[in-house]
Image (spheres, rainbow, N blue to C red):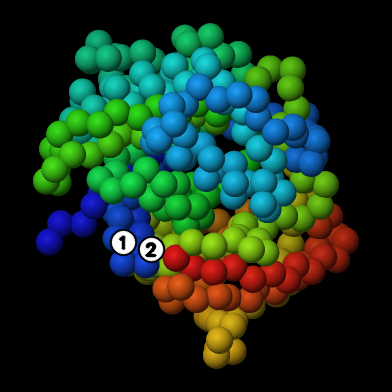
Amino acid sequence: MNKPRLCLPFRARELITLLSASTAITLSACGGGGSTTSPSDATAPPGLTYPAGSPQLAIYELLNQERLRCGFGSLTQNSALNTAATAHATYFSQAKTNPSDEAEIVNSAEFTGATAQDRANAAGYVGTVSETEGYFSKQPIDALRGNLAMPYRGAKLLSGARDVGLGYTSHAAFFVSGTIGALVVDLGVSTGQPSQDPAGVLTYPCEGTTGTPVVAGETRPQPIDGSQPTWGQPVFVRASSGHILAIASATLTEVPTGAAVPIQKILTQATDTNGIYPANSATVIPAALKTSTTYSAVITGTDNGVYFSKTFSFTTG
């Protein structure tokens, strides 16, 4: 039986198998990056143009819901980024190949720019842009949940971006049976605007987060050692830009039983062999979790030498 597949580029090509409740998704990933201000200063986004019931609206609402709950600030819909993202989604529906990187091939059908930055600039956006792109064969929100279960992708979605544009197309599948969707998420900080930066240490998940995936794996680049490693929903930890974040301890406990979940790796700038993580970010990568289960997390460390402790619970899907 074929698993639903989703491809999402991020710098180097990533492939991940995500299991959330009874849903299995295969993912592949890629990506791209501003002064700063506290997310609490960000206002609620203005009126949207995504149609009611559209995949774009579902992704937009869930992404802002997750960011706002945990203090990362909301993203504002941007028409130029919508144009760039929609054009790139159309490109992938025509290319009929799994994306590796964000690049488009010059002179190919629907070409609008070689990189996410090129495409955004061509659409009229002036600023710094990063991008998530991929295919999926189930619900669009599965793509977002999947990205938030990948150490490198999740870090991008929880970045200091202020603007967002979403593109979606649906077409006949060419590597699985049925119809698939091509989803592109462009994230940006316009020139002259500060990025959103936390005043203290933030985490995702945080208190009250629900519906997280339980198992992810088969990622390139691999965040942990092993030929076919798997892990549960990671815990992302982020401090202000320019700060040095150090994790002293991290525990994850199954609330109903009190059983401790093994921590496979704490990904930091020092331990990231792929050289992607900045000094102000860390990700706690646990073993696989259980479906519909609440977990308690306790993380301690220092933010620029100042002690911090974060305690919260979240529930898997």
Q: Quadrant of the N terminus?
A: bottom left
In percent of width and height, residue 65 lies at: 60, 46
Tag 2–tag 1 contact (CB < 8 Å): yes
Q: Quadrant of the C terminus?
A: bottom left
In percent of width and height, residue 292 lies at: 46, 73
Helix, strand or loop for disc 1:
strand
Name the residue tied to disc 1.
23
Residue 37, by quadrant, is top right
Q: Amino acid at mark 2?
A: Ser
Q: Amino acid at mark 1?
A: Thr
Which mark is drawn over residue 20? 2
Using the rendered image of the protein, determine whether residue 28 is visible from the camera's viewpoint.
Answer: no
Residue 22, by quadrant, is bottom left
The residue at 30%/34% (across/down) is 182
Q: Residues within 10 Å of mark 2 (few under 14, many from 20)?
A: many
**In front here: 41 or 267?**
41
Q: Is residue 182 above or below residue 279?
A: above
The residue at 65%/20% (across/down) is 190
CA gap, disc 2 to disc 1?
Answer: 5 Å
The residue at 56%/21% (across/down) is 78
